[in-house]
Image: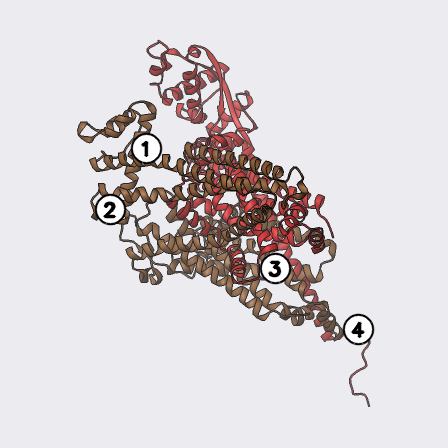
Chain colours: A brown, B red
Amino acid sequence: MDMSVFILILALLAIGVSGYVFCRFRAVASAGGNQRALHSLPSYHGWHGFIMGFLPGIGVLTLWLIAQPFVIEGNMGRFFDPALFESDTERTLLMADVRRVAAGLDVAVTKGALTDEQAARIRTEFGSVRDRLAAVGVALGAEVTPQVLQAAQSYRQQIATGAIWRTILTLGVAGVALIAAIRLTSADFRARNRVEAVILGLLILASTIAILTTVGIVLSMLSETIRFSSMYPIGDFFFGLTWQPNFQGDSDLGLLPLLWGTLYISFVSMVVAVPLGLFTAIYLAEYAGPKVRAVVKPLIEVIAGIPTVVFGLFALITVGPILRDWIAMPTGLGSSGSSVMTAGIVIGILNIPFISSLADDIINAVPQSLRDGSYGLGATRSETIREVVLPAALPGIVGAVLLAASRAIGETMIVTMGAGAAAKLDLNPFEAMTTITVKIVSQLTGDTEFNSPETLVAFALGMTLFVITLGLNIFALYIVRKYREQYE
Amino acid sequence: MTDAAAPKSLLVQDTRTRRRNTAEARFQAYGIVAISISLGMLAIMLWTIFSDGVSAFRQTTFSFPVTLEAERLDPNGNRNRDEMAKVTTIGYTNLLNASLKAHLEVRGISFEGVDDKGIAAFISRDTPARVRDMVLANPAMIGQTVTVSGFTTGRIDGYFKGRVTRETAAVDTNISAAQLDLADRLAEAGIMRTGFNWQFFTNPDASDQRPEAAGLGVAIIGSAYMMILVAIFVLPIGVAASIYLEEFAPKNRWTDLIEVNISNLAAVPSIVFGILGLAVFINFAAFPQSSPLVGALVLTLMTLPTIIIATRAAIRAVPPSIRDAALGVGASKMQMVFHHVLPLAAPGILTGTILGLASALGETAPLLLIGMVAFVANYPAGPFEGGFLDPASALPVQVYSWASRADPAFIERSSGAIIVLLAFLLVMNILAIVLRRRFERRW
């Protein structure tokens, strides 16, 4: 955001404050100083003035800032070959060039190497623009073509005109709205209702951000996945058995090895987490006295508060080497510290508190009368738990297990640090394997260009992950709702 | 009559009862075993991290006199900064190495079995650059004898902390037993000492060859910036959304959709938010990569559902009688919410927000995608000078990037960074608990 926009916002704030003062004053004056004669409290009149002075102006400014880049980019078309400009990637590159040269000219002007006049007139025929810009410390990759230079000059021109019109329009709208607010103000004016309507609007806007986030997630991944499918056959992606990205092109980007690794590791983690979590919950809910519970429950929940990267380091430096040296090497099953077992066990530990606290709540929700009935028939505590409490709590527990599975599938740091990077379709749990999330990280970190299938495949992977976890979550909610026992 | 079974004493359990009672004891034991395994794993994890990490807070430094010889550092002899800048750090490295050797000879410390290269391996590559900057800033120093202090290299430092031993040195080509003997003598002579390492908190990250100089400065600043921004973004939005959903929203399909959305977003894997941030904030809106602003936006979207859920619970806990009383004396609905409900719910909202921020502080995966894993050696500018847009790192990301380096000395740094991170988390959680205890009201 450049300086002028910042000053403009400050100006709008000033207009708003003056609106507050004027409207409040006018309202009190119109009632002859008798505040009880007003419909709304004076401060509501003041806030009405502020809103009218500030909000329309900031709205116009926002719209302008969003629209301007699109309009200017559209105007750039006349400098370039239309065929070139039609293609998405070419246009992005050209526009990046134009922006860089324009920014270079800006720097040259602020440093005094060029006057504004010269910057607007400089031509490639008079010598290398690149060298002149390099002299003031602006490094350009390649020599500037005449088209790009002209486009850049026009770009600067349009930005400058845009800034002037932006200021005029914003301040104009704010001024008109302010005058309207002052004229509206009178003792009978229902200022409170209008202010409250605006506040309600803001509240609604805030609550739609959750929706916008979901829409943003789906749209951003969907559009990049569609771009990916135009470069790489989508059938090969979903059913390919090999994953071999190659940044020179000619990659094999098959999903199945990654999906297999993900599911295998999640399975191992569930084998660890479900029994440990469930028995922890059963003990805490049914056997432990209040004192034990007050100590153990928070301690178990400490596990949930530890960042996953800590678990990742634990997998990398402790669990991995122990499994390798004590189990994998002696039995000859593998020689790598990173393995399905390493990542699975550590994710399992991470998920224990998740399962145990959900299951604890569910078991506690089973009414005491069911237990009493069972004890009355002569059942022991464990028989009661197995035959009465758990069946009653089953839908909730299944829901909790599904949610934990979805967390295991989406877990990133532990698998990045503990599972390895080799995409394999293998049954041996002591081999290094890799997951969807690991590959999303590895394809998108570092210097990446967003027009190769090797990068875009990460978005397709993200989409797959999103669909799987969302499906599991919805299925979990469905099970809980459908089979929930009502005990009232 | 009664059947033929032998009369049973009530005091002697029959086999079936015994079996059932053992099953009972076994079942209870399963629970105890499960809890012990869980807590045992937690204890092992924390213990390994702490035992690996505490040594990061101590560091071995050396100090010895160095004569800043004019013929080496200013060959033309006219103290011109531009000419002096032609002497690279290699020149300074040679000077430091020669000075250390000379100092050993003066003090009569034997360096038998250690060649020049072996002596040079004591001084961190960080030091010559620092001395060079110092000299270039003040050319009048040339010719004087100054005491230069700095870090020793990672292997020597590791020897004093017990990470490097004579056994590991035997298989390590980077260090020899003779060097370790010399290190012992240097420590005895007071040339090297191990002390608390403040620079671990203030230094920026350092390259692969200089683990001893790597610090958390940039990461702590980056995390602090992000937490400030997340708090600024998430608190108003979260509170506004919760107020609407709890107090104003009509029951219709649209609000149902919002509700389902919030609970689903809370369960979306965090890396998906990273993809969103990359696509929307970096590729589309063209915000700078690795900047705390983008990190904060991503973390805001990620923590928003959690905060909304906590805030709604706090608002719901305010009893309806308060609302009725406010409406009864003529307050509008908006006045009722902002004058009565919100102040009463504030402690609960604050507690929930702090816990949400704590979970955001430890989040790593989405930050990897928006480029915060990049090597950042410069401190970001102050918050009012555009520092929110400068590249920065973050504490959990620094843990990851150190853990993925080759030198084992970085594992110590990584664990040390975790200790710092856990300390921050502990403070935030205690703050939340204290707030809850202090202001919690029962109606």
Residue A87 left/right relative to B259: left
- Of tags 3 and 4, the one toward the viewer is 3
Disc 1: CA contacts within 10 A as few (<14), some (14-19) or many (>=20): some
Seen at 67% across and 71% down, the residue is A388
Label 1 – label 2 distance at C-alpha: 21 Å
Determine which of the numbered discs, if any, sits on residue A103 in the image: 1
Determine which of the numbered discs, if any, sits on residue A95 in the image: none
The quadrant in which residue A125 appears is: top left
In the orientation shown, which residue stands out farthest toward the left? Answer: A125
**Which amino acid is tagged 2?**
Phe
Name the residue carrying label 4.
Answer: B12
Q: Is residue A353 visible?
A: no
Is there a contact, CB below 8 Å, between mark 4 and mark 1? no
Q: Name the chain under label 2.
A: A
Q: Quadrant of the C terminus of chain A?
A: bottom right
Name the residue carrying label 3.
Answer: A358
Q: Position of residue A372 (x, y in %)?
A: 74, 70
